Each structure stands twice: as structure tokens, then as C-alpha cells.
Amino acid sequence: MPEKVFDCLVFIGRFQPPHRGHIEVIAQALSKAEQVIVLIGSAWQARSLRNPWTFDERAEMIRACIGSEDQSRLTMVPLLDALYNDDIWVRDVQKKVRDLAMQPAQKLPKIALIGARQTRSNYFLTLFPQWQSVSVDPLDGISSEDIRVPLFHDADTARAYLAQTPHPTLEAPVTARLSQFMDTEHWQALHQERQLLEQYQRAWQDTPYPPMFITVNAVVVQSGHVLLVERRAAPGKGLYALPGGFVQPQERLEDACFRELRDNIRLKVPEPVLRGSLRAHRLFDDPHRSWRGRTLAQAFYLALRPEQRLPEVRMPRTSRHKAVWLPLADLDPEQLFEDHFFIIQSFLGLPAGYNAS
């Protein structure tokens, strides 16, 4: 076996799902390094059309495509996103690689990042100047996003797509696991969200330009609790979300936030007290943050004075959702809608790492 150029190569991706291009990068990494660390991003997030599969499911798909002789040299670990703070994310990557990279005898490990050349998602290769970069030519025409579209359109379309032999973009172990996934309640829920999305898009298909939506959210914190809304309908049925909604045409953003708290959440705190509790506000504009399309969210952080009792909330009986005060210690990224965990993280400085145990 030829001597390896690197002690450790690091491959970062979302792998939603893993396709032939991903597997080719891992294969090349295994040929160049003694150890390959695959950091699987968007871990611990609620299932969505953009993130349909959990870390464990994606790791299993990848490992099923790797030969038995290389399994011991391949390490896969989950990586939580930090959408609005690259520094938090970079620190998390650095720490994981430092803790996982095998130490050669009496020398520092030679570590490098590996990724497909000139892909939009690989901008992070520039965030780690202490490591070399190894570029691999991407396989033409392969995109995880393009793979996800037919998988959730309808059952017949999805099964026909997966039945292609040989499949042009997916390895056989991956198509087998995706076929099994179609028999789960998770696929049914995502299929329903896909139908809602298509209905939503049809309503805007005749606009002369792509629509852009403006929303507000309130991050209301008191005595170690954050005010959330439990969604009781798709999309995101069963998930927690921040209070908020769309901005009306003749409305200031701040006024829209307090209107939502007053009229829709019915938070029993006088509005002057709420306005006096405003500590910060910020625009959240990740292009993929919302299932409905390009949606900007202006969020307002309100720190209420600590009290023995949390303020009462009485949402209208006609509301499809339920308001709750959730202890900060119980915040779980997998139970938060869209990017709402990261909005809370941005204001409260929650740590990047997340331990599912």
C-alpha cells in the first residue's frame, strides 16, 4: 500500500442525501490519508424538506458505501450548524478535529480539508488557514437538492426515481435505504409539507418577480424560560417556534412584533413594559431559513424582569397553536422550527455543541 500523504483528511458536508459525488470524495480521501473524518452538518435539526434525514441515517448510508477494509479509518461525527455565527461553527469544527485526529508518533498530525472544487457550499474551506486544502473535481450534474425534489413529490415518482438501475447519482446501498424510508411516517409528513409548499408556490407563480417575505419574531425571556409556540399543523407540526408573523403593509417592524405578542399570543404583560424590555434586535436572512422561500425575519430580544411567576398567555381559542414557557435547559434543536433555535442562540449565546444524551 503506498504511503499516505496526510495523517488526517476532513470532509465537511450535509449529505442530504449522500450521493456519488460525496462517496467519490471520501474514496479519494481514504487513498490519501491514514484517517478520514467526515463531519456531517445540519445535525440535530428537525426533519424538513431541506433536512429530511438524521445524522444516524446519513452516517449509515455513507458507511454502507465504504468497503470493509476502510471502515476502521473512517470516523463520522455530527456537526450542529451555527447559521449566524461562523466563529462559533469554526470553533466547533476545530475542537472536533483536534479531539478526533490520531496523533502520529512524536509529531503533529498533518491535517487537511478535502472537498469538491468550486462548489458554492465549500466556502468554508477558506475558514481554516491552519490546514491545507485538497480539492477534488466534482462529478458533473449531481446535487443533493435535485435528488430531494422527486423523492417527496409523490410515491410513484419517488419509487420510479429510486428504481433506476444503475442509478445515475446514488449508490445502491443509498437507494435501498431511501426506499425503506418511504415506508415511514417521516416520509408521509415530508410529502405533506411538499404538497403545501407546491400549493404555496402556485399562489405566487404569476408575480412579475420572485416573492420575498418579511416577518418578525419575538425572543421573550424571563427567569430562565423562553416563550415559544407549539405548532399544531404542518409545516412543522409538533415543533416549537418563536412567536411572530408577517408584517402588515403600513406597519413598522417593531410595531409588528408587539402586535403579534398582544393580539395573537395575548401575553399578559403591559405593552410599555414589553417595549422597555427590548434589549436587541437583528435581521436573520439565511437564504434557506424558511420552507416557503426567500423570507427575511427581524427578531426582537425582550428580557423581562425576573419574577416568581411567569406571565400568563391566553392565545385565542381559534388558534391552531399553543403557547408555552420552555426552560432554556430544555431547548432542543431537533424540536425547533426552521432556524428558530439559531435565532435564540444568537441572542442568548448558547454553546455551539449539542449533546443528544
Image (tube, rainbow, N blue to C red):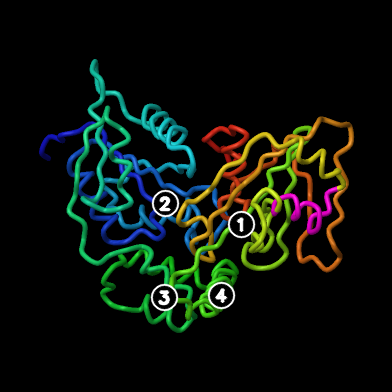
From the image, tell me which residue sits under label 3: 150
At 28% from the left and 65% from the top, the residue drawn is 142
Q: Is residue 14 magenta?
A: no
Dominant secondary structure of the residues highlighted in magenta in the image: helix
- Residue 32 vs residue 19: left or right? left
Viewer-nearest of labels 4 and 1?
1
Residue 73 visible in the displayed image: no
Q: Position of residue 281 (x, y in %)?
A: 61, 40
| Residue in the image at 82% along x and 38% along y | 273
Above or below: residue 227 compared with residue 168: above
Secondary structure type for disc 4: helix
11 relative position to 302: left or right: left
Decide: is 118 above or below 8.
below
Q: Which of the two discs, 2 and 1, sits closer to the camera?
A: 1
Nearest the camera: 163 or 45?
45
Q: Are marks 4 and 1 in contact (CB under 8 Å)?
A: no
Give the mark nearest the N terminus, 4 or 1. 4
Badge nearest the viewer, 4 or 3: 4
Disc 2 and disc 1: Cα gap in Å? 35 Å
- The residue that disc 1 covers is 215
Label 2 sits on a secondary structure element that is helix
In the picture of the structure, the residue carrying the numbered disc 2 is: 59
Q: Are marks 3 and 1 in contact (CB under 8 Å)?
A: no
**Magenta segment:** 256-267
Q: Quadrant of residue 200?
A: bottom right
Which of the two discs, 2 and 1, labels the residue nearer the N terminus?
2
Assess disc 3: are there few (<14), some (14-19) or many (≥20) residues with their C-alpha within 10 Å of its C-alpha: some
Residue 147: percent from the left, percent from the top?
A: 37, 68
Distance in Å between CA atoms under marks 2 and 3: 22 Å
Sequence-first tag of 3 and 1 = 3
Q: Secondary structure at mark 1?
A: strand
Report the amino acid beneath label 2: Ala
